[in-house]
Image: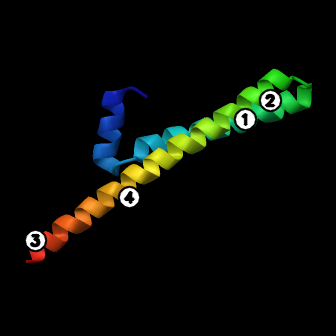
Amino acid sequence: MNDKMKERVDDVAGAGTSDKAEGQSREALGRGKEAIGAATGNDSLRAEGMKDQASGKVQNAVGEVKEGAENLLDSAKRALHKH
């Protein structure tokens, strides 16, 4: 997903959504690669799948942090507007 598309997704669905979606997709792809590698005895493909899963988890965590930061900012704005 390119940067402009990620911005649009996040604008519509909330900060971090695009990172979480990409991370989850990368994790799923990694699980598939790992399973195929294990089934066929291809250690390289299995390792690549494990790497993809780890990368996906990191990207998903980045999305969670972005979402949390946006929520915190929104809460702070609401608190300021009450006063």
Rendered location of residue 83, percent (x, y): 8, 77
Of the residues shown, which amino acid type is indicated by label 3?
Answer: His
Of the residues shown, which amino acid type is indicated by label 4?
Answer: Gly
Of the residues shown, which amino acid type is indicated by label 2?
Answer: Arg
- Residue at image point 32% right, 61% down: 71
In the figure, is residue 77 to the left or right of 22? left
Crowding at mark 2 (Cα within 10 Å: few <14, some 14-19, many 20+): many
Q: CA distance from mark 4 to mark 1?
A: 27 Å
What mark, if any, has residue 68 been given in the picture? Answer: 4
Q: Which residue is mark 1?
A: 50
Q: Which residue is mark 3?
A: 81
Badges 2 and 3: C-beta atoms under 8 Å apart? no
Classify mark 3: helix, strand or loop: helix
Classify mark 2: helix, strand or loop: helix
- Residue at image point 59% right, 36% down: 55
In the figure, is residue 76 to the left or right of 49? left
Classify mark 4: helix, strand or loop: helix
Crowding at mark 4 (Cα within 10 Å: few <14, some 14-19, many 20+): some
Badges 4 and 2: C-beta atoms under 8 Å apart? no
Q: Earlier in the sequence, mark 4 or mark 1?
A: 1
The image shows residue 75, relative to residue 67, as above or below, that is below
Q: CA distance from mark 2 to mark 1?
A: 6 Å
The image shows residue 20, relative to residue 39, as above or below, that is below
